[in-house]
Image (cartoon, coloured by chain):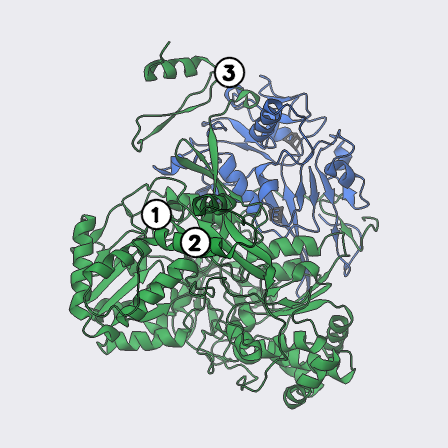
Chain colours: A blue, B green
Amino acid sequence: MAVDADKCTGCQACVVACQSENNIPINEPDHFLQRRAIQWIRIERYWEGEFPDVKARFVPMLCQHCENAPCESVCPVFATYHNNEGLNVQVYNRCIGTRFCANNDPWNVRFFNFWEPVWPEPLRNQLNTDVTVRSRGIMEKCPFCIQRIRRTTRDAGIEGREVEDGDVVPACVQSCPTNALVFGDLNDSSSQVAHLREDGRQYRILDHLGTEPSVHYLAKIDPYAASEGEHA
Amino acid sequence: MALTRRQLLKYSGLGLLGAVVFAGCRIPDREFIAESPVMIPEDLVYGDDHYFATLARPNTGVESVLVRVMQGRAKKIEGNPDYPMSRGKHSAQAEAVLQELYHPDRIATPLRRVGDRGAGEFESISWDEALDELAARLNDHLVNPDTIALITGPLRGTLGTVVSQFADNYQLRRYAFEAVDQTAVRTVFNRMYGQDRLPTFDVQNAHYVLSFGADFLSHWHAPLHYNWHYGEFRGETGGRGKLVQIEPRFSLTAANADRWVYANPGTEGVLAMAMAKVILDSREGNPDGMAALRETIEFNALPMETVEEITGVKAGVIETLAHDFAANQPGVAIGGGLAAAQTNGLFNMTAVYMLNALVGSVGKKGGVIFNPPAPIPNVVSSAATNPLMDFQRLADDFRGNRINAVLVRGVDPAYGTPGSMQFGRAMRENVPFIASFSNFMDETTLLADLVLPDMATLEAWGDDVPEPGPGYEAGALQQPVVMPFVEGRAFGDVLLALVDDLGGRTTIKLPWANIQEAVRAEAQELWIKNRGSVQQFSNFEEFWVAILQRGGWWDTNATAPAPQAPDLSADPGKALPAFSGGASTYPFHLLPFPSHSMGDGSDAHLPWLQATPDPITTAVWSTWVEVNPRDADALDIREGDVVTVESAQGAIEAQVYVNPATAPGTVSVPMGQGHSSFGRYAEGVGSNVMEVLDAVSDETTGAFAWGATRVRIEKTGRRERVRKFEGMVVAQTLPHRTVYEISTGNGGGAH
Ligand code: SF4
Ligand code: SF4
């Protein structure tokens, strides 16, 4: 996946699209106070400066699908694993809730279900039947909408063709009105993501940890950038 | 072997089938999700799904969407890739329309009031009873139709046509209500160019966008459409455009601008006029534009020192921006939001929109593009609303017992008008009969004698003429994608059914049995035109299926005629703003803003939107007040302190959020919360900022000046942690490591 930080407006369309697609429990008011709200994709907002020379920067944050994922090696039951397409996925009904993976994930994009999810009737009717409803006591995270990858692969198979670049669209990418999010196969050198990876603005977040994230960011462009160097 | 239902359940429990099985063929009470014990997400197998094109109508405007329907249930909203206004995209707000459909607090049957007004005691009645009662009560008052008020939201398309013809037919008073109205912008385009419809600002193709208060990336006009424009504007092709946002509040658009310039509240017109003068004096404008506007600019522009003092913007900045704007064409100046919500809103908008004429970007790519009306004459293609002044007069008429019946549909004026107007109270105490067509028990519906539940958007027929449009003729269709979930009836269908039961005049024909028939009748006219995106069908039924599948119809060749020179003969009103509340008692300018996700509060009942973080503060499920760090120090308050925000009209409580981007001397509070009645997810959350706003309006247009109230801040001594997303993850500073990187130009090295 590639994320163009110069295009992201912070509109939150991706966030709600993900909640809807992936049966994410309703984030009730208390969940925020307990720091237990679940958002597989979130928009981080960073402040720079103070009035009147102030900037707010938006960074969409989701599982980076690390090549050397530190969350995987610590799972005692192999509930989190690497599939052969390079995705980091979670087998929900194998998870026993040790939360080791969350401890080991530097991006904080794994979430623990502290409660049984509740959708008062008839809100449950909306739930996506392609996606498991996670019960209490297990971890969950962004699998790049694997159900959509499977559906597309299956449909392409039925039609007797190969999956092409742009065929697979995770829910966040599909909604993003500015096209800040781009999804594709990094191994396919002709794909749009592979091109974006070569862009002069490309960088990876926490690259120095050596986990080889698969999400490539493109730097925000700011012709009036106040200062050079460190931001955190 | 024939499979029984019991067997199917058994097999799916053992196998790899992740399927949904309904308990019966009627609406089931519950769904079973059958899962294998060792199912990994990769192995999921799917049921059959269908996609239908229809409309979603969230608070941010109408969007053409595709709905994924499985086993009779709507599962997912997705943008309609074909439709020119959405291009496959949809907003967070549109997604939540699913929760409107399956909301646990939807009103399921017609209700008749049994207890006191406003006590919330109702009995469930049948539709026959409800319609009989409605017709009987209206017939009582039809001898005097001017005592019947019909209040709806802004309505476009066929429903707009049906409602206005119904009102005209019986000569009822008709009102369109919107808490944050666009009257000033509409008036300017009407006066200057004779346009009844909002134009489109071609941000996508602009090199320079100069926006005065228009928060078009969050909540102004068509945010989904403008977010899409913005993505293109930042694109590689054609270079990266520059966006300058001028406004007293740091809005989402200001956060995304290349440069945010603070100007004192209400002084945007003075500033724009000064820029116009700079462009005129340096002869950088378009020759025709300069000739047409010279007189107006020279008459209105103030000396630069005075402008500096009034606006708080340095002369050097004004000059640079003016030169930049003139030099980087095509460019577009946009005005709205807080700049229009002042007592001098019309002047501000006139001055801002003059800039486009001055540089010659009206009617040009990358400038202001006009939209032709709907191709079919009667279809309403403008969602103009009544200014606040009209509702003030209506409230006076309630108090003067000049109104006998109120019919209200889908809007909540008892909640959404300034507290000092006492609109709800006047209605409760003085109006003999109130009927509400609503899906939810909002504050206005709570006062009703008769409640007639409407259909949810995904259950009903309808259409829309987008406003602003794509620059050419376009229309979108709405079809039911699921069976009605409760016993609702579409508002339009009820009105059409009433025609038979009402006596009185029938001068205007309402020949259709229901809205579906009306929409089809209009589609028939389109079919006969035989042009545009769906054409060359010999048979109407095939054409009808084709436009339903496509979600609408448009004709890229049918653009608006070239604009005339602007007419500036009408008086734009006073140049300087007036504020409610003296500066010594009320030291802060209150700059309210529509909630990013819930708007004016009409979507506050949807849990996804309550839990969507405000992009700037990341706050959720609450009402907060944004205060500048130095002001907070001076007041000795910090984040989480509960304070009262008090004006001469009233006071509300809010939690302090210290915002480094809030200008000193201003405070900001989001709209949309503080519902006393609106379902479990809205009730009791936060405060309603309308209660502190004074009902002041623009003298010329009567539009609500919601940015013109001054307040003071008092501590209550209580503290509560702010519910917000920020801090969910503990922030750690990593030396010499960046989370986000900044590049100073295209392709330039990141640092
Ligand atoms: S970002 Fe976190 S959860 Fe995702 S693969 Fe890397 S370590 Fe694991
Ligand atoms: S949808 Fe796109 S523009 Fe909106 S917040 Fe997400 S990444 Fe940013």
- SS label for mark 1: loop
Label 3 marks which chain's residue? B
Distance in Å between CA atoms under marks 1 and 3: 37 Å
Mark 3 near ligand 1 (CB under 8 Å)?
Answer: no
Give the chain letter at badge 1. B
Give the class, few, some or many, for how many residues have Cα within 10 Å of label 3's Cα (few <14, many ≥20).
few
The residue that mark 1 highlights is B680
In-image side of B407 versus B554 (left or right): left
**Quadrant hosting residue B601:** bottom left
Report helix, strand or loop for mark 2: helix
**Residue, x 52% and y 20% (percent of image)?**
A96
> Which chain hosts label 2?
B
Residue holding disc 2: B524
- Check disc 3 and give the amino acid type: Val
* Category of crowding for the residue at label 2, using alpha-carbon neighbours closer than 10 angstroms: few (below 14), some (14–19), many (at least 20): some
Type of amino acid under label 2: Gln
The first of marks 1 and 2 along the sequence is 2
Q: Which residue is mark 3?
A: B38
